Amino acid sequence: MSTALALSDDQASAFDTVTEMLRGAGIDLDDALLMPPKSSATSVMAITGKAGSGKTLLLSELYKALEAAGVEVVSGDYESRRRKDRRTLAILAPTNKAASVLRFRGVPATTIHRILYTPVYDPEYERIAEWLAGNGDRPEVEGLTDEALDRAHAFYQTNKSIPGALAAAGLRGSDFITGWKRREEPLDIGFIDEASMLDDKQFEDLKDIFPTLLLFGDPAQLAPVNQSGTMVFDKLPEKRVMNLGRIHRQAADNPILDLAHALADPQVDFYRFEKMVEEAATKDERVVWGQRVEVDLMARSPVLVWRNATRIRLINAFRAVYEAPDDRLIEGEPLICDGLELPLKHRKKRLDLEARGLIKGAQVVYLGEGRKPGFSRLHVIGAEDPQVSAASIVKIEKPDEEEPFIPYAARMGATFLHGAAVTIHKAQGSQWNTVQVFAPDLYVAAKMNRTEAGQPLWKRLAYVAITRAQDRLIWVVRNRLSKPTGPLRVDDLRSVPAATLTLAPEDPV
């Protein structure tokens, strides 16, 4: 196939193996033929490789080939009317941030959680969605001009996002989405990026939805908590796992990836590795030997640490330098969603919040108080419709104090921890342009001589932390914090009215 010309030898081999698996599922990429699946049995395959090996490029090429063959891509933001003969593909990631990284590269990804639920569209705007998806004629909608529809169409041609296209036409999510419903029928094919983060339960849930699963994962990352150091693809038969060993040409001459791969050398201890970082910093501006934590970066790119105690100290130092009062948050403070505290009777509101991106681990920026006591206006980083107002419980942990301080809280709703610093475990699945790694924590891990899956723990931590950086790595070697160059800001976030997710009037907050 011509696709193989763009791929390295091991990528092309993996492409051919996946093509054969898909043929067994009734999808012939060579001849662009779609047939009913030959079997109802679940087929799982994994493509593994370290950072830079080309997993994302391969995922993208497979997506393009499936779309060209006529497979319908289900993105989670809108699902077209079902056809009996349709074949479907969903491309999933564990977090909003990981999904947004794929979308930035032209791959219509959504979160694993989001695919469990489908939005219910207002019938008037559903006609626009069907037209954009190629299943209907151009509609006439009261209140929308031809120019607005043209903007929606132009946006969709590039981004393949129905909510994004409707936003380009001047609409908000609350205008066209009336609710959410649990997925009732399975899909066909699932591509799962960052599969190293999957736990066994998530894996079983995905197998219930997708008869054909293709996992993309990095075996050098940290295994999920309570997984005994193993990842779901470690349990697959050897012939069902393809490893990409070659560092792809687009990743060549990248000092950040060079450092990450140097960790595989058993002769490299912590002291030698730090020397390598220091030397790399003298040769390339993409690596920085940092004498202090740059506080300006912490609002959007958290400092990555190993120990919770370090995380809490850095968070409180961040709040102190911005003169944030103890009794409230200030605009621009970063938060991390820590889950939802809602009783069972509010199941619909739970679906609303989760579908809008407020899932555990979501990175959020605080925009200010909501209209009701206990509500917050929030910007969900990486979500396609990012601004939302929701009942919030914000917990700020204090050094040497068992209970967190809660400056602002509803009785129930989305719970948040401060996000100026996060553990390396929680950073998995996310990437930022610039990443600060707090090296003194990794030094402690090295001194403790702890291992995970036969590898020194500090090396796994360092590998995950380093590979979160897209453009620049700051290796912070001293326990110091810089002064901010200005106040926290929110003006760079897309400014659209927030869709308020409230409880029904008879249900007190």
Image (spheres, helix red, strand yellow):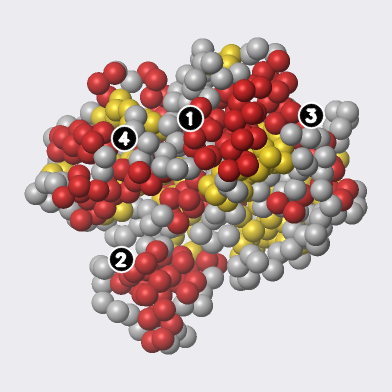
* Residue beneath the point at 38% across and 47% down: 250
Q: In this view, does 341 lie above or below 158?
A: above
Front disc: 4 or 3: 3
SS of the residue at dot 4? strand
Which residue carries the number 2 mark?
133
Inter-mark Cα distance, 1 to 3: 29 Å
Chain-order first, disc 3 or disc 2: 2
Q: In which quarter of the image is residue 18?
A: top left
Q: Quadrant of residue 59?
A: top left
Inter-mark Cα distance, 2 to 1: 42 Å
The type of residue carrying mark 1 is: His
Inter-mark Cα distance, 4 to 2: 24 Å
Cβ atoms at labels 4 and 2 below 8 Å apart:
no
User: Residue 172 appears at what percent x and percent y?
Assistant: 54, 70
Which residue carries the number 1 mark?
261
Cβ atoms at labels 1 and 4 below 8 Å apart:
no
Front disc: 1 or 4: 1
Residue 304 visible from this viewpoint? no
SS of the residue at dot 2? loop
